[in-house]
Each structure stands twice: as structure tokens, then as C-alpha cells.
Image (cartoon, rainbow, N blue to C red):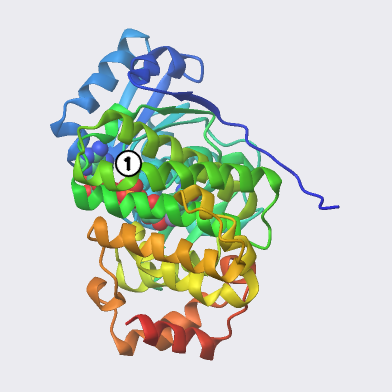
């Protein structure tokens, strides 16, 4: 019998229009909020102003920190934490894509613990007294609203790495699919493939359990049914809602099972070359599935029903059809298919291979990699 633990402490508010609740929900967590968000999209759409108004109506003071770019750095988190301390903030709100949400988590840790962000990278370094986090995703990809992870780039050593702490789960997540309607087709595809990678990788992980499998399969079914439509017709709110739910469920799945080599390699590539995260792991996904066939063909074949593929009774055939279905989605959403399309060149391969080996994601992968096999694998996808 398999033994496992399951922990998911996030109070989740899901659905169209749920953003309206932000004021009263924030009020239950604190009186003075640092609102952490990106530089452009939410401001242009008037969402940032709307959130500030809803907070102030509920007597929550707001300090705006709107400096977050993709792949957030140590410096941007440390600076945010200084502001949070100076301003006496007792609540951190993340509004935006995974980058804004992760920065909010990092600020919550640093403002309450005192050192610099990089001191808390890894597992077990964060203690219980973090500032409460309220997460409002505006992309449908990272699932950061339901994970204990937050991912940062250290520019000095060109390394992307994560804090993994049960104390860095958001207290509350508001997942309002209306917020994702403004994503461009490319951003929808990139972030959608992040969610699909989370779900498939959690399903393949050696740490998968019956609950993470259930969450992953539901996420994959939703994505198989809606990602192409959401990419081509961003106004389709049902497709947007399906993707938002899938992303959140996939976040819950990786919180339990972790991810595998697609993310291990994707994080190394992102740290060294500052590539868009979802696009990077999306390119790797079908190749990682293929590479795992010798160890995980049965598990991959079990995903056939998620793609509406009737079971042929032959595991190898079904697994192949599942991988083909993923490739078809890549084609239909116009995601790039080669690593050179995101700026990886042959000279980067040894650095990536060296950087990835100590990552827990590599240890979670069913078929093991050593440095030489990583190099061969990456050359194949270049
Ligand atoms: P980002 O948060 O980096 O956002 C990408 C771009 O999308 C930004 O330019 C942002 O603009 C824009 N944007 C965000 N929302 C919208 C919208 N609704 N409409 C139009 N534009 C929008 O992208 P991701 O969400 O993919 O997050 C990636 C990050 O998350 C990476 O650092 C990755 O490593 C991390 N990650 C974290 C995980 C976790 O568990 N914590 C899991 C997986 C990935 P603007 O800046 O103007 O707001
Ligand atoms: Mn990811």
C-alpha cells in the first residue's frame, strides 16, 4: 500500500467576478497591504485601481509596489521587503502572473525573517511567522496561488531556484477567470503549457499519489479541451475559466508530487538565458514524455482518456497517441518546438547540464539522467 501526506491550506475563491471580494477578504488578513504587481497590463486595464479602491473601501491601506518583471530577481524581492517593513505592512497581496505572485511570497518571507531572499532558497529554511499572502493570478499557468513554491533568479550566478515552504502558501487565493481574458494568444499558449507541464509532470513524478493523480488528470482533461480554444478565441469565457481552473488544480498537484525533468531543465535554461518559463517547459514536454517511455509508458497511456483517445488495449500504442496529442496542441497553439527558438545554442548545453543535476525535479523523474545523458537529450531538441 502506498503511503503519502496531503497538505493544501489555501482558501480558494474561484469564479467569474470573484475579484469583487478582494476588499472584504483582505480585511480578514490585515490592515495595511503591500500590493505587488507588474509594470503594465493590470494598470492599463484599470484592474490595479479597481483593487486599490476595493481595498480602501474596506479600510485596508495600500502601498503599491508595481515593479515586477518576468523571472523576478533577488533584488526586486529584497527591495519590496524593505518597503513592506518600513511601511509597517501586515499583508502582502500578489496581483498578476506567476512573477508577481512569487515576488509577493518572497517579500512575505524576507520581510518577516530579515535576511536576503537567497538565504531562504530550498526547503525548510522558512519559519512559521511569514506575513499572510493573498494571491490573485491574472495568467492561467503557474498555479502559484495554490503552491508552496516561489521561483527567483539570482543574476550574479545565473541561477533560477525556488523557495519550497509550507509557510509560503497563500492564505487566500482569488481565481477570477475574467482577469485572464486580456492575455494575448502567445501568452495564453505559453502559460497554458506551463499548466499542462505541471499536470503531466506531477502525474509522472515518482512522488505522485492518488490525490495528486486525480488533480493532474482533471487539469489535463480541462486543458486538452480548452487550451487551443482559449488561444484562438480569448473572449471565450468558458475556455478561460477551464484554463484558470486547470492551472489552479495543476498547482495543487505539483504541491504534492513535485515536477520532473521538464521543469528541472526548464529552470536551468531560464536561469542561464532568462527565457519565458511556460514556453521553455512546453517545448520540453513532449520530449520528456518520450524519453520517459521506457519507465513510464503505462502511466502515460493512462492519460489517453483525458485527450478523448479511446483505449486500444495496447499500452505502448496508447502512450504514443497521448504524446502525439500533446504535439498536436503545440502545433495548433503555434508554440515553438525547438530550444534554439528561445535562444539556446550548443555552447549553453554543458552549463545547463551541470546546473540541473542537483535539482529535486531531476530526482523525481522516472528515467534517470546523468550529465552526459542531459547533454545528448538537449542536443536532440536544439
Ligand atoms: P509572468 O508573471 O512573468 O508574466 C508574463 C507577462 O504577462 C508579463 O509581461 C505580464 O505583464 C503579462 N500579463 C500577466 N497577466 C496578464 C493579463 N491578464 N493580460 C495581459 N498580460 C498579462 O508570467 P507567468 O504567469 O508565466 O509566470 C512565470 C513565472 O512564474 C516564472 O518566474 C516561473 O518560474 C514562475 N513559476 C512559479 C511557480 C510556482 O509554483 N510558484 C510554478 C511555475 C512557474 P505585466 O508585467 O505588465 O503585468
Ligand atoms: Mn512551471
- Tell me where residue 336 sits by quadrant: bottom left
> Within 8 Å of ligand 1, the CB of disc 1?
yes
At horizontal 37% and vertical 9% (from top left) the residue drawn is 58
- For the question of whether residue 363 can be seen, the reply is yes
Check disc 1 and report its element: helix, strand or loop. loop
- Tell me where residue 260 sits by quadrant: bottom right
Q: Nearer the viewer, residue 210 or 277?
A: 210
Q: Is residue 260 above or below residue 29?
A: below
At horizontal 32% and vertical 90% (from top left) the residue drawn is 347
Q: Nearer the viewer, residue 309 or 19?
A: 309
Query: Residue 54: x percent and y percent?
Result: 30, 14
Query: Residue 333: x percent and y percent?
Result: 25, 55
At horizontal 31% and vertical 89% (from top left) the residue drawn is 346
Query: Residue 27: x percent and y percent?
Result: 45, 14
Q: Which of the four quarters of the rendered structure image does ligand 2 lie in? A: bottom left
Q: Residues within 10 Å of mark 1 (few under 14, many from 20)?
A: many
Q: Which residue lies most toward the front here?
A: 312
Q: Which residue lies most toward the right here?
A: 1
Left or right, residue 124 beside residue 292: right
At horizontal 21% and vertical 23% (from top left) the residue drawn is 49
The residue where tag 1 is placed is 139
- For the question of whether residue 156 can be seen, the reply is no
Q: Is residue 303 above or below residue 13?
A: below
Q: How many numbered discs, if any?
A: 1
Q: Which residue lies most toward the left here?
A: 44
Q: Nearer the viewer, residue 64 or 196?
A: 196
Q: Is residue 257 above or below residue 265?
A: above
Query: Residue 8: x percent and y percent?
Result: 63, 36
User: What quarter of the picture does the C terminus occupy?
Assistant: bottom left
Left or right, residue 259 beside residue 66: right
Amino acid at each position: 500500500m502506498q503511503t503519502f501526506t496531503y497538505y493544501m491550506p489555501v482558501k480558494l475563491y474561484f469564479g467569474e467576478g470573484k475579484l469583487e471580494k478582494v476588499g472584504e477578504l483582505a480585511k480578514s488578513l490585515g490592515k495595511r497591504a503591500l500590493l505587488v504587481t507588474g509594470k503594465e497590463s493590470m494598470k492599463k486595464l484599470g484592474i490595479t485601481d479597481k483593487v486599490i479602491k476595493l481595498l480602501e473601501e474596506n479600510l485596508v491601506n495600500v502601498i503599491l509596489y508595481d515593479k515586477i518583471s518576468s523571472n523576478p530577481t533577488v533584488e526586486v524581492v529584497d527591495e519590496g521587503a524593505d518597503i513592506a517593513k518600513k511601511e509597517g505592512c501586515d499583508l502582502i497581496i500578489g496581483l498578476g502572473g506567476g512573477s508577481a505572485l512569487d515576488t509577493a511570497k518572497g517579500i512575505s518571507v524576507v520581510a518577516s525573517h530579515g535576511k536576503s531572499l537567497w538565504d531562504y532558497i530550498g526547503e525548510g529554511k522558512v519559519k512559521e511567522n511569514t506575513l499572510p499572502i493573498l494571491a490573485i493570478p491574472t495568467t492561467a499557468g503557474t498555479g502559484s496561488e495554490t503552491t508552496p513554491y516561489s521561483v527567483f533568479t539570482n543574476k550574479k550566478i545565473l541561477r533560477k531556484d525556488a523557495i519550497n515552504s509550507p509557510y509560503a502558501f497563500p492564505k487566500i487565493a482569488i481565481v477570477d477567470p475574467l482577469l485572464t481574458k486580456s492575455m494575448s494568444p502567445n501568452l495564453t499558449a505559453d502559460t497554458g503549457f506551463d499548466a499542462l507541464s505541471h499536470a503531466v509532470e506531477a502525474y509522472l513524478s515518482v512522488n505522485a499519489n492518488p490525490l495528486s493523480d486525480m488533480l493532474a488528470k482533471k487539469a489535463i482533461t480541462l486543458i486538452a479541451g480548452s487550451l487551443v480554444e482559449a488561444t484562438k478565441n480569448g473572449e471565450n469565457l468558458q475556455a478561460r475559466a477551464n484554463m484558470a481552473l486547470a492551472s489552479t488544480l495543476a498547482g495543487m498537484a505539483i504541491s504534492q508530487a513535485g515536477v520532473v525533468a521538464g521543469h528541472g531543465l526548464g529552470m536551468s535554461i531560464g536561469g542561464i538565458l532568462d527565457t519565458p518559463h511556460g514556453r521553455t517547459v512546453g517545448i520540453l514536454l513532449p520530449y520528456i514524455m518520450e524519453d520517459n517511455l521506457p519507465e513510464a509508458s503505462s502511466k502515460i497511456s493512462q492519460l489517453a482518456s483525458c485527450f478523448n483517445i479511446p483505449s486500444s488495449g495496447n499500452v505502448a500504442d496508447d502512450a504514443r497517441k497521448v504524446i502525439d496529442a500533446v504535439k498536436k496542441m503545440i502545433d495548433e497553439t503555434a508554440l515553438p518546438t525547438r530550444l534554439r527558438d528561445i535562444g539556446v545554442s550548443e555552447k549553453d548545453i554543458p552549463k545547463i547540464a551541470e546546473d540541473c543535476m542537483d535539482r529535486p525535479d531531476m530526482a523525481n523523474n522516472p528515467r534517470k539522467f546523468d550529465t552526459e545523458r542531459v547533454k545528448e537529450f538537449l542536443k536532440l531538441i536544439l
